[in-house]
């Protein structure tokens, strides 16, 4: 990787060392534009933009035709990666309280590459006057959902009751639980009741042998995620919540990743 870096480091610097070049590439991602359009879009002088354009043309990232500027095929790919980098760094900074000092082993590498999908997510934190705020916000959102997917190595009676309420209202619930949490569920909830919902097809119970350190819930129009601290305890003080399409897709991918490792739970 170091050898590879030495070969491309100047190109990397070319993209990120100039606000002008970066903004031109991002602006042209929307389509072909003339100088006036670019000046209005990125709020820079014509001379500054033209200088940046010249540099980009030398790298075969843009081309000019009939007074309009467009990204080349190479430029299209570069724009995509540049925007992805911006979103990823923004998300990492915004979500650092969720990730820092927490166990992130339950999240596969490919999803960290797509961390930019969480750019518009909210981080809900406990406060001195409302220590249960993350949990209360999370439960309020789950209670509004009819269809729920839940991956967890944490047992919470309040959440479980909401799942049962959703089933009573005709919803569908899919639970991916670690072995210990599955046993706790069966101890807490009347087995005939669970069997009734499973037989009806409204409830799916999947057991995960891996002791994943996460609690992930996906509802009709939201996803929420909590993590364990590096000390080993589940952190009730912070939770991620999002209703954005990209975040929901990211959450679904994380859920499916662990679902593939499960076995069907028999009652």
Image (cartoon, rainbow, N blue to C red):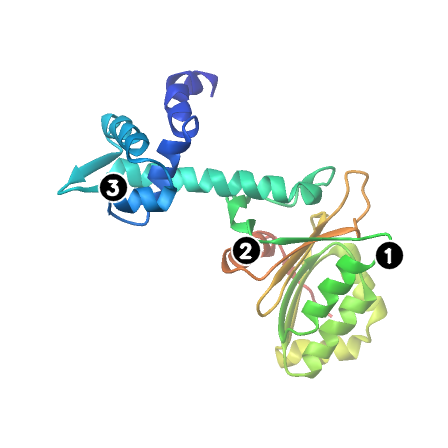
Secondary structure of residue under mark 3: helix
Q: Residues within 10 Å of mark 3 (few under 14, many from 20)?
A: some
Q: Could you say which is closer to the camera, residue 266 or residue 250? A: 250
Q: Position of residue 121 (x, y in %)?
A: 60, 53
Q: Give above or below for 213 relative to 207.
A: above
Q: Residues within 10 Å of mark 2 (few under 14, many from 20)?
A: many
> Which residue is pictured at 25% across the width and 41% down the height?
35
- Please give the residue where the numbered disc 1 appears in the rendered image: 129
- Which quadrant holds residue 164? bottom right
- Please give the residue where the numbered disc 3 appears in the rendered image: 35
- Classify residue 188 as left or right of residue 16: right
- Measured in 3D between alpha carbons, the distance from the residue under mark 3 to the one under mark 1, in whole angstroms, is 54 Å
Q: Residues within 10 Å of mark 1 (few under 14, many from 20)?
A: few
> Which residue is pictured at 61% across the width and 77% down the height?
201
- Classify residue 20 as left or right of residue 256: left
- Classify residue 123 as left or right of residue 108: right
Q: Which is closer to the viewer, label 2 or label 1?
A: 1
Q: Is residue 113 visible?
A: no
- Please give the residue where the numbered disc 2 appears in the rendered image: 247
Q: Could you say which is closer to the camera, residue 50 or residue 153? A: 50
């Amino acid at each position: 990787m170091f050898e590879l870096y030495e070969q491309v480091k100047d190109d990397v610097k070319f993209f990120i060392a100039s606000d002008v070049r970066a903004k031109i590439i991002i602006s042209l991602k929307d389509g072909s534009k003339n100088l006036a359009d670019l000046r209005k879009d990125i709020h820079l002088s014509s001379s500054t933009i033209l200088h940046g354009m010249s540099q980009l043309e030398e790298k075969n990232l843009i081309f000019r035709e009939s007074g309009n500027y467009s990204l080349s095929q190479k430029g299209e790919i570069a724009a995509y990666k540049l925007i992805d980098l911006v979103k990823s760094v923004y998300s990492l900074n915004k979500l650092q309280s969720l990730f820092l000092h927490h166990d992130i082993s339950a999240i596969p590498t490919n999803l960290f590459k797509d961390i930019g999908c969480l750019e518009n997510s909210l981080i809900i934190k406990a406060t001195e006057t409302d220590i249960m705020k993350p949990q209360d916000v999370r439960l309020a959102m789950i209670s509004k959902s009819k269809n729920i997917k839940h991956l967890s190595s944490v047992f919470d009676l309040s959440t479980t009751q909401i799942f049962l309420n959703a089933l009573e209202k005709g919803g569908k619930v899919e639970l991916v639980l670690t072995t210990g949490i599955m046993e706790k569920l069966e101890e807490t909830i009347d087995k005939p009741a669970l069997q009734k919902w499973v037989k009806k097809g409204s409830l799916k119970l999947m057991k995960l042998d891996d002791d994943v350190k996460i609690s992930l819930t996906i509802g009709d129009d939201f996803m929420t995620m909590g993590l364990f601290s590096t000390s080993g305890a589940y952190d009730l003080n912070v939770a991620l919540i999002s209703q954005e399409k990209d975040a929901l897709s990211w959450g679904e991918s994380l859920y499916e990743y662990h679902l593939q490792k499960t076995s069907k739970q028999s009652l």
